Image: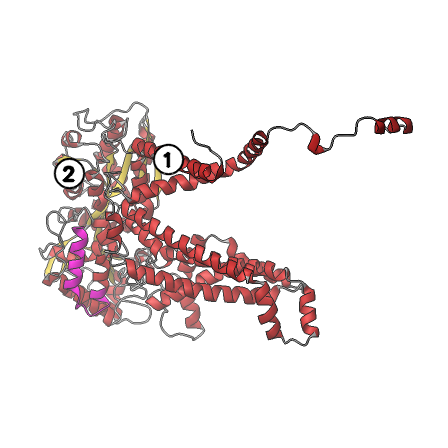
Amino acid sequence: MQVKAPDRAAAEHRAPPRRPADRPRPPAARWWRSRTVQGLGYAAPTALFVAVFFLLPLLLVGQMSLHDWPLLAGDRGGNAPENYTDISDSPLFWPAVRFTLLYTVIVTVVLLGLALLLALLVQESRPGAGFFRTVYFLPGALGLASASLLFWGLYSPTTGPLTGILEKLGLVDDPVSFLGTPTSALLSTVFLVVWKFAGFYMLILLVGLQRIPHEIYEAARMDGASRAQIFRSITLPLLRPSLALSLLLCVTGSLLAFDQFFVLTKGGPDNSTVTVVQLIYREAFQKLNLGTAAALSIIVLAALLLLNIVQFRGLRRDDAS
Amino acid sequence: MGSTTGRRGQMRRLALGAVALLTTASLITACGSGEDGSGGGGGGKAADAKGVDDGATLTMWTRAATRPQSEALVKAYNAHHKNKIELTVIPTDDYQAKVGAAAGSRDLPDLFASDVVFVPNYTSSGLFADLTDRVDALPFADKLAQSHIKAGTYEGKKYVVPHTLDLSVLFYNKELYKKAELDPAKPPTTLAEWDRQARAVDALGGDVNGTFFGGNCGGCGVFTWWPSIWAAGDQVLNEDGTEAKLDSATAKKVYDTYRGWVKDDIVAPGARDETGATWTGVFPKGKVGVMPMPSTTLGLMPKNLDLGVAPIPGPDGGKSTFVGGDAIGIAATSKKADQAWNFLAWSLGDEAQVDVVAAHKDVVARTDLASNKYSDADPRLVTINQLVADGRTPYALKFGQTFNDPNGPWLSLMRDAVFGDGASVEKDNKAVSASLAD
């Protein structure tokens, strides 16, 4: 309803309207509390989820790591720090640490290099780009255990087709042992992981590439910059957030490698592909010792936490500079 | 009372939260680790030898490796009893973890079978109910496969009965034997004869090979190599399973024979990589002369494959077998022990052993039924059934982590001895002993 002019004038002569500051307001503490309650309400479901499914198990693992806890017999009481000191006594521990680091370096370099190449190939909206993006990403839709089983079948010299195909093509004379030597087992696993995850990391990098404004590239071209210069001085620096995220995910995932080795090599041949997480599994379900497995889990968690802190700090420093 | 706001307040709340979580964790842990492992099993009491058939629903677990045998027994039992068994088949590799987790949460089924070599882990941890009186009351108690009963006896009490028996025996391809001008009626009786016959078949050339084995599978080595050592009268472990004797002169003769096959390419492709998943799939293709196989695969062989069965021989003769398979017991936490016993007692009776087990060409769990109407029609079954008395089941609490674990010390010994030069057998044997005594 519109206010008539005389009424409006009368209204103007009345007491001036209260500004927000003049309104009676609740005491500061109550207002703060109300906001807090609202915030807690929003955060509670997630906090509860994290508490139940992360913090509580973490505390249990911490407790387990300080106790003698056979899988079949349950808690037999504290034995700290025996579970932690026992870890380094295992002849498999240090080789597993070395192998996990080697695998992480190889996978990270090969996987991110290939993912970047694929992202650069399909970043422009040309005919067929959508098809190739889908094809590259498709293996990522498969579970890692399923993909590992698929490759195990392909690699098998007794039941797999690869050896037969290579023989028919005349590339080899004898059956190929894809998982028979330490080097071939490592490379065969790396091949699987790259096949499986290259499309996923391509997608992350593709999003990063498409966020770089075209005007910057045009300006560089007008200034006479070569393709290599554009890539080095524009693409790479502006892609850093996406590269950083990919690096973080890839390194963390590789350090926690388990499924692919469990299915493909079972740590063999001759214990040459045992990863740290496989050791945790071995302690818990082969040696039936949950205490040592928990201690090893805590050590891996601490190492990952440290690594992530270092990576984040490095990235923040880069951003600041 | 201190403030709950500000930095100090936040810290206090965090600390309070952590204490609350720790308290909850402790309570949960305390609840989950009860001392009493006997539950409602009541297996030690003398009960009706046949148990109770009152229409109870029983839960039962078995591993995938012995699924056909378990399913056949359960199906036959459910068809003629008021009690009903709900069978769950669990992947073989996950079985120990599943049982361990269920034991921790006191959530075991009424009945659970186990690879017989892992039974000592469960009996020593109190997971099975005491069946001593019930087993002893059976009219055929002394005729049950004693290697399984022995593996399930802990501190003088019997906790399990044989469920499915799986013996290691030699399978040989009679058609290839004829082509190689070997007598198909004369399988090897010594390791030297086995060697000679495998080489003769391998000489046929093409895609035919003399033999095959799982060279990256500790369990396969235990199952197929140890009978050759036992056949010579030697031991592989000491009495309480804490010391290995795998560096004996007999053991070295066995390793030497296998190493010779690898060196001279008598073995079918893939032996070096074979982790156990497909090792029984090679012989049915009809291109391997003679190799050790699990007896449970006899009924699964192609109908057109003319194969013979023979005991695994020692270097200079003798015969033995690894009496594997599954033993079964009643969970200590079961509230239906009498009904569960009804199934176990029935499964060992004449009807189940002959009309279910023997009819499926599987090994019977009783020596007095070695010769029955089904085995009489197939002499190979008699050969297998009679081996139960000559066979052994090794006993060691640390069996899994030492011999079955793909990263365990036995697999290193196996591979060094056969794919290497065999020079580190003594050193590797010490590592095996250390694992057993761990």
Q: Circle 2 marks a residue in which chain?
A: B
User: Residue B245, image x and y in percent?
Assistant: 12, 57
Tell me if mark 1 has few (under 14), some (14-19) or many (20+) residues whose alpha carbon lies within 10 angstroms of its own: few
Q: Circle 1 marks a residue in which chain?
A: B
At x 41% / y 68%, what residue is drawn?
Answer: A164
- Residue that numbered label 1 is attached to: B19
Q: Is residue A55 magenta?
A: no
Residue A112's place in the image compared with B396, above or below, is below
Residue range of the region highlighted in magenta in the rendering:
B416-438
Tag 1: amino acid:
Val
At x 15% / y 44%, what residue is drawn?
Answer: B147
Identify the residue at the far top of this view: B54
Tag 2: amino acid:
Tyr
Residue B112's place in the image compared with B222, above or below, is above
User: Residue A127, image x and y in percent?
Assistant: 67, 64
> With B95 as the anchor, is B436 left or right in this view?
left
Q: Is residue B417 magenta?
A: yes
Question: In which quarter of the view is residue A189 placed?
Answer: bottom left
- Residue that numbered label 2 is attached to: B154
Magenta stretch: helix, strand or loop mostly:
helix
Nearer to us of marks 1 and 2 is 1
